[in-house]
Every structure is written in structure tokens, then in C-alpha cells.
Image (cartoon, coloured by chain):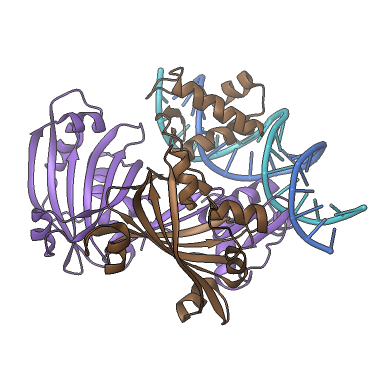
Chain colours: A brown, B purple, C blue, D cyan
Amino acid sequence: MAKYHAIADSVRAAIAGGHYPLGSRLPGERKLSQEYGVAPGTIRQALAELVTEGALASRQGSRKIVMGVSEKTGTFAEFRSFAQWAWSRGRTPSGQVISAQWQVATSYDREQLRIDAGRVYSVLRIRGLDGEPTMVERTRYSPRVGERVEQIPDDCASVTIWLADEAAIVFARAEHRFSACSASAEDARHLQVRRGAPLLSHHRISFDQNGTPLEWSEDRYIAGGVSLVVGNSTNSNVLRWA
Amino acid sequence: MAKYHAIADSVRAAIAGGHYPLGSRLPGERKLSQEYGVAPGTIRQALAELVTEGALASRQGSRKIVMGVSEKTGTFAEFRSFAQWAWSRGRTPSGQVISAQWQVATSYDREQLRIDAGRVYSVLRIRGLDGEPTMVERTRYSPRVGERVEQIPDDCASVTIWLADEAAIVFARAEHRFSACSASAEDARHLQVRRGAPLLSHHRISFDQNGTPLEWSEDRYIAGGVSLVVGNSTNSNVLRWA
DNA sequence: AAGTGGTCTAGACCACGTT
DNA sequence: ACGTGGTCTAGACCACTTT
């Protein structure tokens, strides 16, 4: 583990433990670099991590102010994968594939996935938390990914983890779009809500490390089930589910 | 303007202009530091900005890959202020205060705003885009802020800007929570939708540079009007309205 | 006036990806 | 084997806040 990351953990723990009270000012960077026996730059990098999280407030010329540590900020993987998110919150995810088939790519598919023509692998899934239906997920995989998704056993817990381990397909970046929508007849049937009920729509495009699109998806969550949490400041933004 | 920021702008422009094609690999950091005549660390800082935005993908050992520049990423101010966001998107915001009054702080108010007792200034606003009602906003200001909000003239375009200029109250950080909800009878009346219509709920707490809570608010947007856009990667998260 | 963070320099070594 | 990014060092000067 990198020094700066270990130091960030240490400071985070000191805040959580009340050693640096909420609202107080952190020691100066030069002081901390002596305490930890590292170069000033390493301390800067450690504190930058905490500023990004919102645990510290930063103003030029003034010592950093303790804002308090937030509940564990979701990692990228947790944010992208329903299963990983659910487990990290101590809840039991369930999932069921309603339909899965190859379809001719629409112009929207081609644009989003940046493919010339051909087909996409289209999957409709229902996902639940602790047995309650929570979300309906409509995903289009690009051909390369779809060929692998097809092989995934039905009882696989997490598509994301399976693809990484078995097919070396790694999700590295995603763009998300959130809005409200009404439940369609199909949504209502699967989620056991009335038609027209309010849903949180989560539109997502995922990319690998080379920037190649892997899939796009529209997930629809029942109201009250989950919510998206975002922290932002003049410098940065951090988000997580809650 | 800092060198590293100017360099980030320059690289961003080079990507947008097609000089670094989408999917290609950026020159190495040492090469760039020579080109720009700065130390390697300065280049690193510039590229870190672009990685955070999602414009570049980064893997140790490999040159950075061009992901493409997203439409202008919203600044913190734009994300926090409806008026500033609207202007930045070339739309005309309107606003109307329905009611404004001092109220006894509830236990929820006291917890969120970290005040011992007393009162909060409670404001109900309707906001619109290009004349169409778009959002209903229910805000509770802490006493210190409420006293100034009370003085704001009715025709003030942006509360955020007014408070910064006239009262030196600066919003520096905020936490946001998004979910779906149904329009209440009051919501429906103000937004001219049917009762029970799907709305996007945006719950927000704002802080100043010292970490002191300034206000909390629940905004409810009509479906289809606006949506929240978030980009995230293994390293970072960036969000904006769209 | 003194202290502090923000920026910048000019290197070094290591882990990892590419060739 | 080589190139590259990730990490780290040990300083310097400036802008800003605090005292």
C-alpha cells in the first residue's frame, strides 16, 4: 500500500476516533510531514484524498478544517454493480433473467456502443433486495461482451465479477444519467407496483480501460428503495448509493 | 491562472480539436514536460485534472488514453444554484417565492443544521425554465443565513450570488441525495401536474468553507425536465446537470 | 509579521504494460 | 528490454489567512 494512502487512512481514523474533533483545524502540512517522517508532498497527496471525500475543507492560507468522515464512500465497482453494492450494505441481492436474446442493433445502440452494424445481446433482468423486487434492468451488450454474457451460468451472482475473472473484461468507467419516470405496464408487472408509479431511472454506459463501450443499460428503481448520494465542493465530487 | 490549469485547458482543446484523436494515446509525461517547458510534476497535475473529468483514462505503465471531452462539466456553483445552472445552459430561469417565514426548528432541522434550538427561516419557491414550472423548492435556512435571506429583494436573480456579494456567505460544499417520489397535492398544484405524478427528489445540505451548515432543502423536479449526469471511474467521480 | 496552503522545480526508484 | 505512469524526496517562492 502506498504511503500516502496509509497516511490518509491514519488521519481518517484519527478523525473518526475524535482525536481531531469536528470543526477543529488539522496540524500544518510541515508539522505532519515531520510526525509521519515523510516529505511534505506525500502529506499533501494524503490530505488531497480526504479533501476529495469531503472529510476536510481546504482554503489557501488556513489550516485544513475537519468536516467529519462520511459513511464509507462507495467504490466504483459498488456503484456500478447492483450485487456488489447490495453486499456492501449488508443486504442480500437476488436476480432473475426474464429474457435474453440477440437483436439487430438500433441506431441508438450503434451510437452508444460505437459499433458499425450487426447485433447486440439484449437482456431483461429483475433484481431484488432481501426478496423484495426493487429494480428492472434492461441492458444491451456489445457483441464482444454479449458472447461472453451468453455463457454465464444462470446462478452466477455477479455478472461484473464473472466477466472480469473469466473473460478479462473489466469495467473501468461509466456515465450515469438519473431522472424520474412513470412505471410502464411491463415495469408495473415485474415490480409489483401500479402502472404510472414513480420510478428512479438510471441510464448507464460502461467502458473498459481503453475507452471502448461495453454495454448500455436503463435501470428503473422503485421509489423509496434506494437513493443516490452525491457530495460535491468547489474542488470535487464524490458519489455513492445509500 | 496556474500553469497546470492552463496546460489542462490546452490539452482539452487539443482533444476537442481532434489533434489527439479519440481512443489514441497521449504523449508520455516526460515528452509533454519538454514540449511545455515545465517540470514533470506540473504535467502530472494537469493530466490528473483531465483524468478526474473522465477525458483521459489512466493505467500504470501505459500512456494515457483519450476518452473525449464531455460537454462542459458543471462547476460546483452551477450544480448548487438553479439560476446559475439555467444560465449556463442558455435557458431562462424564473422564480417565485410562495411563502417565507420564521418557524420553530424541528428536531430534523436542528440535526441537519447543527443548531441547538431556536428558529429557521423557511422558504417555499417555485422555479421555472423558459416560463414552464419545473421545480418546487422547500428550503430551511439557519438563523444566520435566514436573517440575510429576509433582506433579499424580490427581483433578485440568484440567492447564492447575492449572499456571496452582499453578506460574504459562501457556499463551499454540499451533500445531495436523489430519489423518485410522487407529487403531493401541493406539488401538483404548483407544478401543474396530476397528483401522484413522478418527480425527481433532490435533497441537499450546503456548508460554508468552515464546514458550518447553511441550509437544507428538498427540491422536486418534474419528470423529463432535467436529469442528473454523473461520470465515474475507478479513480473518481464527476457530476453535472443535463 | 508570521504561519500556512498552493504551486512549481528537478530529480529518484519501482511496478507495470508494451514490444 | 524498454518505456511509462505511480510514488516519493527535498527543497523553493508566492498568495492568502491569521495573529
Residue drawn at the location 43% of the way across and 30% of the way down: A69
Whether residue A221 is visible, yes or no, is: yes
Can the viewer see residue B226?
no
A195 sits left or right of A179 in the view: left
**Looking at the image, which residue is at 53% across and 37% down?**
A48
x, y percentage for residue A118?
Answer: 57, 81
| Count of numbered circles on the image | 0
Quadrant of the rendering where the C terminus of chain B is positioned: bottom left
In this rendering, the answer to whether A121 lies above or below B212 is: below
Q: Position of residue B156 (x, y in %)?
A: 16, 54
Q: Quadrant of residue B127?
A: bottom left
- Which of A80/A197 is in front? A197
Whether residue B23 sits left or right of residue A28 in the image: it is right
Residue D1 x, y percent position in the rendering? 92, 52
Q: Residue at x 47, y 60 (%)?
A: A175
Image quarter of residue B55: bottom right
Nearest to the observer: residue B62 or residue A91:
A91
Residue shown at the point (21%, 64%) measured from the top left: A196
Front-most of residues A130 and B54:
A130
**In the image, B33: left or right of B88?**
right
x then y, percent, for residue B1: 51, 51
Q: Is residue B123 left or right of residue B27?
A: left
